[in-house]
Image (cartoon, grey):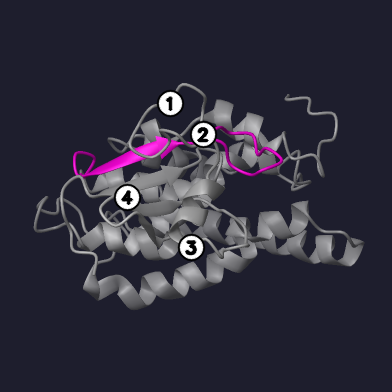
Amino acid sequence: GFPAEAGRYHLVVALICPWACRTLMARRLKRIENLIGVTVVEPELSAQGWRFSPGTDDAISRGRTYLHELYSQADPRYTGRSTVPVLWDRKTGTIVNNESADILRMLNSAFDALAPASIDLYPPDLRADIDALNDFIYPRLNNGVYRAGFATAQLAYDEAFAEVFATLDGLERRIGASGFLFGDRLTEADIRLFVTLVRFDAAYHGLFKCNLRRIADYPRLSAYLDRVLDVPGVRETVSIDHIKRGYYSIKALNPSGIVP
């Protein structure tokens, strides 16, 4: 029910959010910016959730203040959280998907007939290996930093903390002096790792108490981070300003609201 069409779909993202930026990176790497529009919400979470920037006048934010208004339009009975990313169908006025892993896969292949693929982020010969690596990294690192940062018991924090740095140590040993996680091919596994690494020193190291080491203290991971940043289109998906303002606006972790 959702065929690929130019101009029909729109992404709503927050530049603070690693999950949302997975999809933003895929859109740039697949060179489908002219097919799918983007709206970026404000970095700070308000009392009503993600807020569209005042003065923004695009296909999504026009006449709306908060992201939850999109969710209510898609389903007036919805009472859950209004999260990013959102892949919105302008034609039917509904949400196609709000799970970043799903959207990442959709953007990798669904529009290939309209924009010939210059890169395959999920190549058939690597899919089993990519899935296995994703399944390993996600709970221990991608979500591990959140498990540490939002832990309310010392034991839970200690366990998450240990897994975060055991995973980083393992990745430091895995990554070579050049290339990506699977040799010279950039894949979705790199996207999923990169969005955590690029936020680590600016937010997770201090605010989330993941302070044993910085990414800057890992020579190979630092070089890897630079390599991914240098891939055309990637750097434009990163805003350290939004990352800092967004994370340090979380009242439960930083009640003073001071941004370092």
The residue wearing badge 3 is: 75
Of circles 1 and 3, which is in front? 3
The residue wearing badge 4 is: 26
> What range is drawn magenta here?
32-51
* Cβ atoms at labels 1 and 2 below 8 Å apart: yes
In reply to whether residue 35 is colored magenta, the answer given is: yes
Query: What is the distance, in whole Å, between disc 2 and disc 4 at their CAs?
Result: 22 Å
* Cβ atoms at labels 1 and 3 below 8 Å apart: no
Image quarter for residue 232? top left
Asked which secondary structure carries label 4, the reply is helix
The residue wearing badge 2 is: 52
Query: What is the distance, in whole Å, between disc 1 and disc 3 at their CAs?
Result: 24 Å
128 or 253, which lies in front? 253
242 on left or right of 247: left
214 on left or right of 69: right
Disc 3 marks which amino acid? Asp
Query: What is the distance, in whole Å, between disc 3 and disc 4 at their CAs?
Result: 27 Å
The residue wearing badge 1 is: 56
143 on left or right of 61: right
